[in-house]
Amino acid sequence: MAFPIQQVVESDIPELVKIHSDAFKTDQFSNFMLSGKPPGTHESLMERSLNAWFSDPTVWMVKAVDEDGSIVGWACWLTKIVDVDNTERQQPSKPAASQEGAPADTPARVVGRQMRNDSVKWERDSMTENKYLVLQALATSPEYQGRGVASQLVKWGVDRADDGNLTCWCHASPAGNQLYRKAGFQELGNSEYDLGEFGKYTFRYMRRLVL
């Protein structure tokens, strides 16, 4: 079944938050990062991110809708532009806060910081282009998973990348790995994290060249 892909409007944001929260309820990494946090933390963070993306002119936010108009999935594609002098790629990662009164390191903070640093390094070292597309977020409502929604949202983005002669980049969770491969992404490397009682978790760094 084909699900029409439409541009997100601001009033969609609460539904996008819910879809993302529902979609990642069983994700090991998300549950590890949220362990011990108050209820609603995930939703609050996603709402903040979605509002920032929506107001960013370099971002494409699209939704897949069912025949009744309900949103069944969404994606965020970011146009990454790097200065010719390469300054963005040379920025070092921020050191951990050490001042008195700063939040103490927890396992989630340590792993989260390492994940961000690893992701930034792989992208910086792998993407030599001055302009490319990043698949920033992708989520499908659980009851629609396995019905091609995510594939159509990814295809929407890579089609536009091909039209603009742009390479694509993504930071893939275990659930997204095969989906991205089918869309033409190739794995360049990966990082595995020990999440304690939540088990091992591997992020893959993937690039898709223009077809």
Image (cartoon, rainbow, N blue to C red):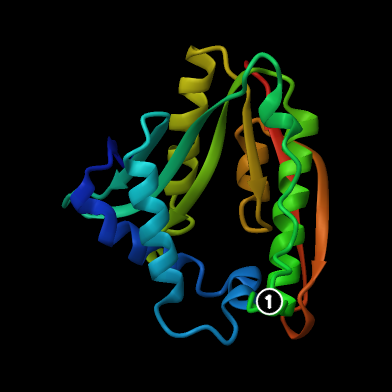
Identify which residue is drawn at 50% across, 48% down: 137
Identify which residue is drawn at 38% across, 66% down: 143
Q: Nearer the viewer, residue 69 or 39?
A: 39
Q: Name the spot of residue 177 as percent of width and height, x first.
A: 67, 49
Residue at numbered disc 1: 100
Q: Is residue 201 visible?
A: yes
Q: On the rendered structure, is 62 left or right of 155? A: left
- Name the quarter where the C terminus is drawn: top right
- Name the quarter where the N terminus is drawn: top left
Q: Nearer the viewer, residue 93 or 163?
A: 93
Q: Is residue 45 above or below residue 138?
A: below
Q: Is residue 46 above or below residue 157?
A: below
Q: Name the spot of residue 173 as percent of width and height, x first.
A: 66, 56
Q: Is residue 115 above or below residue 38?
A: above
Q: On the rendered structure, is 91 left or right of 142? A: right
Identify which residue is drawn at 63% across, 22% down: 167
Q: On the rendered structure, is 14 left or right of 52? A: left
User: For residue 4, which quarter of the picture?
Assistant: top left
Q: Residues within 10 Å of mark 1 (few under 14, many from 20)?
A: few
Q: Is residue 1 visible?
A: no
Q: Name the spot of residue 41 as percent of width and height, x first.
A: 45, 75
Q: Nearer the viewer, residue 139 or 45?
A: 45
Q: On the rendered structure, is 84 left or right of 14? A: right
User: For residue 130, which quarter of the picture?
Assistant: top right
Identify which residue is drawn at 46% across, 21% down: 160
- Disc 1 marks a residue whose amino acid type is Glu
Q: Nearer the viewer, residue 53 or 70?
A: 53
Q: Name the spot of residue 188 as percent of width and height, x first.
A: 81, 37
Asked which secondary structure carries label 1, the reply is: loop
